[in-house]
Image: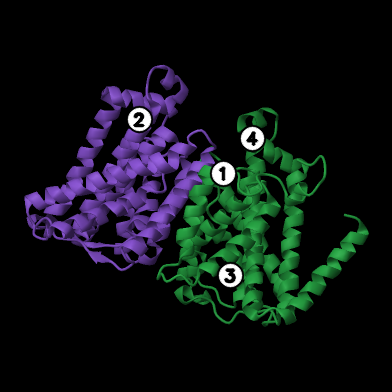
Chain colours: A purple, B green
Amino acid sequence: MQEFLQHTLNGLSTGSIYALVALGYTMVYGILQMINFAHSEIYMLGAFAVYYVARFFGLNTPSTLNFIIGLLSAIVACGLVGFAVERFAYKPLRKTDKLNVLITAIGVSILFQFGGQIIFGADPKSFPDLIENTELFNFLEIPFNVVDLLIYGVTFASLIALTYLVNYTQRGRAMRAVSTKPDAAKLMGINNDSIISFTFVVGSVLAGIGAFLVATKYPKIDPMMGARIGMGAFVAAVFGGIGNLPGAVLGGYLLGLGECYLIGYGASTFREALSFFILILILLVKPNGLLGKTAKEKI
Amino acid sequence: MSLKSKIIFLVCFVGLGIALNFFLNSYIQALAISFMINSIMAMSLNFITGVANQFSLGSAGFVAVGAYTSAVLTKEVFNDQWYFIPLTALIGACVAAFAGYLVSLPSFKLKGDYLAIVTLGFAEIVRVIFLNWNHVGGPRGYNAIVKWPNFTMAYLFTGAAVLITLYVLYSLKISWFGRNLWALNEDEIAAEVMGTPIAKNKRTAFLISSFFGGLAGGFYAHNMGYISPGSFGFLLSVQVLIITVLGGLGSISGSIIASIILTVLPELLRSLPTKVDVRMIVFPILLILMMIVRPEGLFGKKEIWTFFKKEGGS
């Protein structure tokens, strides 16, 4: 029983990370109908940005200030990279075939992965300790740590903030308009390019926050860390219904739990295949995902 | 082609194989064979992605299925006799085609990019299965696969496979079925309205594509003599994709030219002092630049020979 609870807890924490990254995928897919393969590499760059900022300023002690500096550097770096990728790689292709954008996205992703290996080095780096991971309380002999709770909190806060942004603000209405009918949105006086840029930046910032939290929990970062989590997060987004914000979070948690039970009960070598197996099942049974109902629900 | 030019071509093809056996060093010979195998892979991807406009990211999966099937068959059924290689490669291709059929079942229920993700997932699942399958070596890979006895044989059979692939895929491309695929490529809704069974056509095209992917796998295994799950990762799929895009999506023969370029180019860059595989820096940059500057690739949708015709030809 205790073992089961422990696996559940690990699953929830892995799932939160999938959820955070999946939110980014789902945002971009919702507005452009495009799989942003480079999203997981932006996540990776976020972790490295914090690593280098911390090294530059010599931050290596747990304190609130250091934590905030770390978080801000991840947010700023990822926002900038997300903006730049959209501006220089995807925007010139806005008018062409969707396939071209997809191919470019793969190119950007591979470039960051291997460029990262050249610039940062392929060996794992140890992430600075910016927050004290103390045990807050103990439930049935299972420790609840600060970082775990932070991860859950941030995931739900992001979900609520994004839902608010998309559904109840002027900008969110513009985003939904661009997603539904880009040409009509333009006629209504919406600046499509700036809305799309904004969506990319928001998605990338989420990836940055996720990367920062993951690196705090598992303080080893390397240039392939994005590739390891990226496909899982994408599958989570499809699982929950791509384009649907709560769906991405639900999909992330289900996938995280599934993976942790699989590892916990002894089939760890099949871990990488699980997400794709789920994906194929979901496409066979419920192709629109768990929560995806109508096309109108897309952001 | 007239009968006479066919015979001349055949004589040249065989003669070149025998002559090159003496004139080229083994390094260039190995490059030549690997170029041929790459071009089969690229042509197979080109049929589904270029002609039918269905984006697949799982070439490596079908190549792996073909390679393992063929390698295991020659060793365990045909007692390491090299002249069974074409047969086992063909069986491997059929198994890959069957796998392709299974993959195509869930993939074409929805429009959009799902095929890319499903095929990517399929390739990953195949890799994990071989990784966990101890009978075929698991993570250590499958060793001591029988190889071609000499370069001439390798050249003749692999070259023949390239020519057959080119001939079959090109014929299909200009056939009635191929025109259905073009229609689907241009406008799916219009194609459906015209009464072409789009889901069925996509499935058939995917099956054909995976067949040739598997065929390339068989030749790959017997050329290398050693295969491991690591050789069939995502990067192989990306490499095939880059060759296809460079040659031009829809230009079957363009894939052959592009695979010459992209087989030789990395060898020239091999001397650069980096620890990381330099191909994986050059290829994506090439890919991104090409998408922005010349998205149609070298030859667009045209075949090479249309450029040599004096008139007509489009």
User: What's the residue type where badge 3 is placed?
Assistant: Tyr
* Spatial separation of the CA atoms under disc 1 and disc 4: 16 Å
Compared with residue A150, is residue B29 higher up or lower down, i.e. above or below? below
- Tag 4–tag 3 contact (CB < 8 Å): no
Q: Where is residue B100, by image quadrant?
A: bottom right
Q: Is residue A299 visible?
A: no
As drawn, the label of residue A194 is: 2
Residue matched to label 1: B295
Q: Of the residues tagged 4 and 2, which is closer to the observer?
A: 2
Q: Of the residues tagged 1 and 3, which is closer to the observer?
A: 1
**Residue B292, image x and y in percent?**
51, 43
Where disc 3 sits, the SS reads helix
* Spatial separation of the CA atoms under disc 1 and disc 3: 35 Å
* Spatial separation of the CA atoms under disc 4 and disc 2: 30 Å
Q: Of the residues tagged 2 and 3, which is closer to the observer?
A: 2
Residue matched to label 3: B68
**Do the residues at pointers 4 and 2 share their chain?**
no
In primary-sequence order, the first of circles 1 and 3 is: 3
User: What's the residue type where badge 2 is placed?
Assistant: Ser
Question: Farthest residue toward the top?
Answer: A188
Where disc 1 sits, the SS reads loop
Where disc 2 sits, the SS reads helix
